[in-house]
Image (cartoon, grey):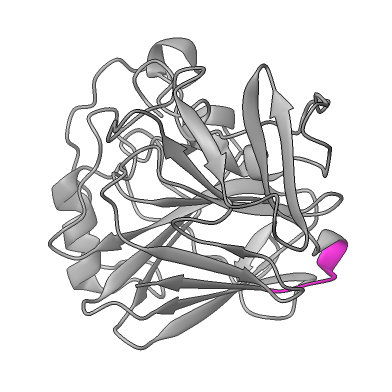
Amino acid sequence: MFTAKLTALLALAAAAAAMPLVNETETPTPPYIPSLTVRSPQTSSAGHTSMALQSFDCGNPVNGLSRDDCNYLSQIGFAGFGQNPTGSSNIWIGDNGLNVFTFTNQASVDVTLVLWDQALGYASSFVAANPPKITYSIPRGGSVKLSLQNGVSGGYSAIYRGQTKLSQWGQVGNTWGEFTTGDHATINISREINMSGNTFVAKVSTGCVADMTRCSFVCKNGANTCGDSGSYDLIGCSDQPNGAVGWWDNNPAGGCQGWSNGSGRIDAQFL
């Protein structure tokens, strides 16, 4: 996603996730894009060719983020912590919205959920330059529910405390989930930033599953990171119920659909 397009749109694989259901020979119409996982700062609105580590005050972190997790985010170079709104936003903590995502930590360590929308376009995923929308601590065995309005595109990842770092471009150097809500709502898993990242699963209540081998963007030819045109594939999607596969600019696009306009729920797990 970051190597001059490290993933073809790393910052928004969410938009990629947002691809409408099309057959494999059609070309979708913007704004439904393929994998937004990797876009190089030189060609995006991020405007950075290198990221200097920053630090911020964790004396009074935002509600939902522990002080220990805040300190770790500061240590690895985040520009700041998230807003973690509880209402009056396009994304908020709670289960009273039309589109509800449940994030569950099934890993052996505590994690911090990191989620961004596309408020700044591709630049939103560059958390070393722009604080994300959500940074929420999830202890082992814990979970949190987020509500999203329709028409929201974005991505998420998880910081495994003491393990996950930022990439050289300032994005979360782990597996990503990418999503778009509303018409043609779609979610996928992108491994383009780090093929060796932690295992993520996203289950749509209507049946489709995105994980490391299903509705997942992966690098070709054994590469551990990718994003340039032609460097990645979308695997394990066309043979699933509500699995959408299409093409955009000669690259695969798609993910799990079947939950448009709040007609389904997302169960996202960190393993």
- On the image, the x and y values in percent for residue 101 come to 62, 71
Image vertical order of residue 206 relative to residue 218, above or below: below
Residue 176 in view here:
yes
198 in the magenta segment: no
- Residue 178, image x and y in percent? 56, 49
- To which quarter of the image does residue 97 belong? bottom right
What residue appears at the point 68 percent right and 66 percent down from the top-left corner? 208
Give the percent coordinates (x, y) of residue 111.
Answer: 29, 70
Which residue lies at the image location 25% right of the left edge and 36% below the top edge?
167
In depth, the one of 75 and 57 nearer the eye is 75
Magenta region: which residues?
261-265
Q: Residue at x 30, y 37 (%)?
A: 128
The reply, left or right, for residue 18 in relation to residue 169 is: right
In this rendering, does residue 57 appear at all?
no
User: Does residue 114 sit above or below 26 in this rendering?
Assistant: below
The structure residue drawn at horizontal position 45% and vertical position 48%, both measured from the top left corner, is 132
Q: Is residue 236 above or below residue 67?
A: above
